Image (cartoon, helix red, strand yellow):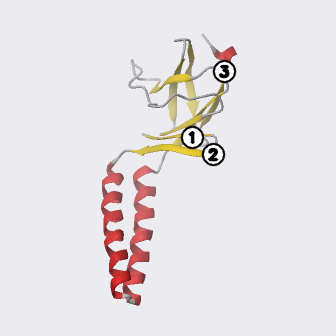
Amino acid sequence: MIGSFHNGSRYRGFTCTGPGLIVAVNVVFAVSKVDSAVVTNGGEKMKKFAVLLAVALMATLIAGCGGKVPIKVTNDLGAWNIHEIYISPSSEPGWGNNLITDVMEPGDDFTSMVTADNYDIKLIDEDGDEYVQYLVEVGADGFSWNVELEDMI
């Protein structure tokens, strides 16, 4: 699962798991080594090779994290912080792990990249109040939820 957490325009974190990530990390390491060689050798062939490796990195990231669509949650609870977010395929019996490590203040948003499917989404605010949507159909365009107090169960 891929996820990112934003506070206004400030980037707070990003995770991407999957087989493509290991390859991507290896390509990043290779590009950094070639970049050093370009600086020390100054050769035009090395510069072209570094560009090709950078393109390979982008392709690897797309392949490793591709096929995903966004579920975006925005905290529109006024003065209340969100402390937990759970997103689980509707076909699964449990909620799984809390997806956030930082508190979502009002105006913050969280995006999790998932495969298109039906999902259950649960949020818990600072008072332990729950906000739940069941059987959310997440299609090719993803899903966005601006959580408001009226959504409390």
Q: Are marks 3 and 2 in contact (CB under 8 Å)?
A: no
* 45 relative position to 74: left or right: left
Residue located at (32% from left, 80% from top): 37
Q: Residues within 10 Å of mark 2 (few under 14, many from 20)?
A: few
Amino acid identity at mark 2: Ser
| Closer-to-camera residue (45/106) | 106
User: Circle 2 is placed at which residue position?
Assistant: 9
Residue occupying the point 43% across, 23% down? 91
SS at mark 1 in the image: strand
Could you tell me if residue 121 is visible in this image? no
As drawn, is 151 to the left or to the right of 121? right
Query: What's the mark number on residue 6?
Result: 1
Q: Quadrant of residue 131?
A: top right
Q: Position of residue 21 (x, y in %)?
A: 35, 52
Label 3 or label 1, whichever lies nearer to me, is 3
The residue drawn where x is 39% and y is 76% is: 50
Task: Please say if the residues under marks 2 and 1 sit with CB atoms less than 8 Å apart.
Answer: yes
Camera-side residue of 152 and 42: 42
**Which mark, by number, is residue 48?**
none
Quadrant location of the N terminus in the rendered image: top left
Q: Where residue 45 sits: x, y (%)?
A: 38, 88
Q: Quadrant of the C terminus?
A: top right
Instruction: Inspect the image, locate mark 3, and give the three-letter code of the amino acid beneath it.
Output: Ala
Q: How many marks?
A: 3
Residue at the disc numbered 3: 79
| Picture coordinates of residue 3, whole percent (x, y) | 48, 40
Q: Amino acid at mark 1?
A: His
Considering only vertical position in the picture, is 127 above or below 45?
above
> Counting residues from the N terminus, which is met first, the one under dot 3 or under dot 1?
1
